[in-house]
Image (cartoon, rainbow, N blue to C red):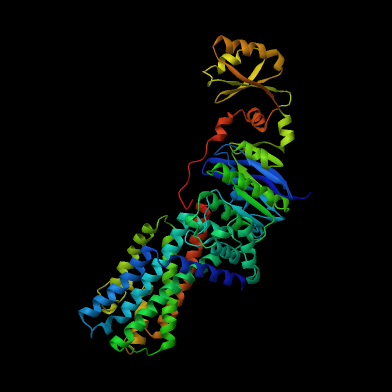
Amino acid sequence: MDEIKKSYFIAKKDMGTYYLKPPLISWGLMLPIVFVLAFYFRNPTGIKEVVPGLIGLTLLFSCTSMAAIVITFEKRIGALERLLLAPLEIRTILFGKTLGSSVFGLVITIVITIFLIPIIDLSINYPFSFSLIIILSGIAFSLLGILISVGVKEVFEAMTMSNFFRFPMIFLCGVFFPVSSMSFPLPILSYLLPLTYTVDGLKHCLLEDKGVIPLYLNLLILLGFVILLYSLSLFIFKKRIRQEF
Amino acid sequence: MDNIIQVNDLTKFYGKFLAVDHISFDVKEGEVFGFLGPNGAGKTTTIRMMVGLTHPSSGTAWIDGHDVTKEPVEVKKTIGLVPETSNLYGELSSLKNLIYQAELYGVSRKERRIRTLTLLEEFGLKEHQNKPFQAFSRGLKRRLTIAAALIHNPKILFLDEPTTGLDVMSARGLRKLILDSKKKGLTIFLTTHYIPEAESLCDRVAIIVKGKIRIIDTLENIKAQVKETEILEIGLDRPPEDWKNMFLSIDGIKKILIEERRIRFHTKSIDRVTSSIIKFLEERGAKIQSINTLSPSLEDAFVRITGLDSELMKIDKPVKGGPE
């Protein structure tokens, strides 16, 4: 319980301290908003079809960007050392950093979703599943961001590294066109990426069951990604700390 | 007094480089223990191993009864560390920085604010409580970093080069704060490359060179190592020329330290060498402005024990990047 409380303090501090950092504003906030506006102005009535993809994209960019900031920035100024010096388990630090990044991403995503509801007459079919999907995806993307960031020193390096994963995901995960329309072997790659299940799950919730994979399976696979990425991040985080400190 | 720190055979390799070479020592509860050595001697690596930030290659350290390699979290509860770089959060005010530290250390909600305000008052930072850390001067940053290390009432305070890079007034103020903390019963472990700092603050000192401890003892005992040495200090009207080797050829002079216009002659008998030195200087037209006899200092003992030039100890490390 004490460790959960400390994770919460880490997350609270991160959100209060870093949400105005320029790389976060440009990659975590501006980019998703630009995508939404671009699609809206191009075709105000047709945007509904790509809303699940846009929401997934928003979550991906905001969570990974925040994760990159909270790790690399603190490494650079030496503040991560303060956390390592406090009586905390490494998993508490990782949980706190993930929590801060996820909450930041979720807030941005929820604000954009709320903004879209009246404009394009959006309705959420399964509110509980919708919530679960964005929560699990937010955690998975934050962990992915942490995994990428622990190995680099500078914020710009973390952002560049993240883009190696993020940009292919835009095209591979059904954000703008369905995975089923891709030719072999691209669908295999698609099904190895968590964003595919986020977008597919959101299609169930926002587009009257237009998802291909059963909703429960999307949720289970996202949960699997969370467990896998958490274990991997914890392992890499511990290894890097031992190497660098 | 009981030992609150016990270090046994602590060793650290970075690749093939041996940074800390099988060192052992103990620190008694309530004392100020100094780790004195030139830059690169292994002081920071030792402190980092002792606080659980760096994993030792072999050996162990016991802090307040806890093995640092096996119970790092327990160790961290009992210690506070002030690293060489003041690394609090630049965007947060001093008040918020301390509150956050208190939260991380599990200080109760009720205690957090009381403890924070008390420390800000004690460290003369009350008027700056709402100012962001990044707007502080180097001296104020150092003060707040020490205050942050004390937020959870630790038993031991580790200070890594606490006054490096500070102006004379800030350094003096900080040394007073360190002594005040000692009076409250805190055990203090500090590393420094300033010999006068070790001399003014420490009860016992370990001199470390190239990862190896050369001597551990009280200041008095260390100085006693050069007790048989007498020191003659001569002040001149101008900086001396390159006479060091010529002075050393005078029978009875063992060592020479030159500092601006002052020359210190280490000898077994002042009476035996004084007339030869005065004659030497007069022949070269140097005007003597003062003659003093001195007791051996820690600096003299350091030079004798390590064989290093004490000038080496006056070189600061290059200032690292970060929110200094």
Q: Which of the 4 quarters of the picture holds residue B184?
A: bottom right
Total numbered badges shown on the rendered structure: 0
Q: Where is residue B245 in the image (x, y as percent from the top left)?
A: 56, 16
- Can the viewer see residue B82? yes
Front one among B94 and B4? B94
Quarter of the rendering containing residue A168: bottom left
Q: Quadrant of residue B44?
A: top right
Above or below, A237 relative to B254: below
Residue at 36%, 63% in the rendered image: A23
Q: Residue at x 31, y 78 (%)?
A: A53
What x and y, as percent, mark residue B101? 58, 62
Looking at the image, which is closer to me, B176 or A12?
B176
Q: In this view, does A240 lie above or below B179?
A: below
Q: In which quarter of the image is the N terminus of chain A?
A: bottom right
Residue A239 shows in the view: no
Q: Nearer the viewer, residue B179 or B153?
A: B179
Q: Residue furthest left?
A: A42
In the shown orientation, is residue B50 left or right of residue A214?
right
Task: Estimate the x, y position of residue B2 in percent, counting from the top left.
Answer: 78, 50
Image position of B131 with respect to A202: above or below: above
> Which residue is outermost to the right?
B1
Is A199 displayed left or right of A177 in the figure? right
Give whichever of B75, B298 is nearer the camera.
B298
Place of residue B316 in the rendered image (x, y in percent of width and height, measured from the top left): 52, 39
